């Protein structure tokens, strides 16, 4: 098994957090804790999801994730 750099591991963890926590916990936090508008929080949750998917695609194309 080959050794992966720590930056790759951190990017994978960041990407999965953005994909899963972005549309759920971030929207809840923005709506209920910061009292932001519902549509603004949904839009930012969707944006976090898209950023996470882009990170995952970047890692897959770089062959960091098999």
Image (cartoon, grey):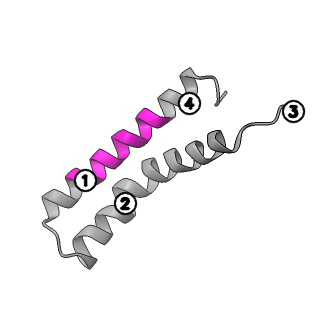
Per the model, the C-alpha gap separating discs 1 and 4 is 23 Å
Labels 1 and 4 touching (C-beta < 8 A): no
The secondary structure that most of the magenta stretch takes on is helix
Query: Is residue 6 one of those drawn in magenta?
Result: no
Q: Which residue lies under the disc numbered 1?
A: 44
Camera-nearest residue between 42 and 63: 63
For marks 3 and 2 on the same chain, the one whose residue lies earlier in the sequence: 3
In the rendered image, residue 35, in percent from the top left (x then y), is placed at 18, 75
- Inspect the magenta stretch and tell me whether residue 44 lies in it: yes
Q: Which residue is mark 4?
A: 59
Q: Position of residue 19 (x, y in %)?
A: 44, 47
Coordinates of residue 49 in the picture (x, y in percent): 36, 45
Q: Earlier in the sequence, mark 4 or mark 3?
A: 3
Q: Residue at x 31, y 69 (%)?
A: 28
Between marks 3 and 2, how big is the CA–CA gap?
A: 34 Å
Q: Of label 3 and label 1, which has the lower sequence position? A: 3
Camera-near label (3 vs 2) is 3
Q: Quadrant of residue 66?
A: top right
């Amino acid at each position: 098994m080959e050794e992966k750099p720590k930056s790759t591991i951190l990017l994978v963890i960041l990407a999965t957090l953005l994909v899963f926590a972005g549309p759920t916990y971030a929207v809840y936090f923005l709506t209920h804790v910061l009292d932001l508008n519902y549509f603004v929080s949904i839009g930012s949750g969707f944006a976090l999801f898209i950023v996470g998917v882009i990170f995952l695609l970047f890692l897959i194309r770089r062959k960091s994730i098999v």
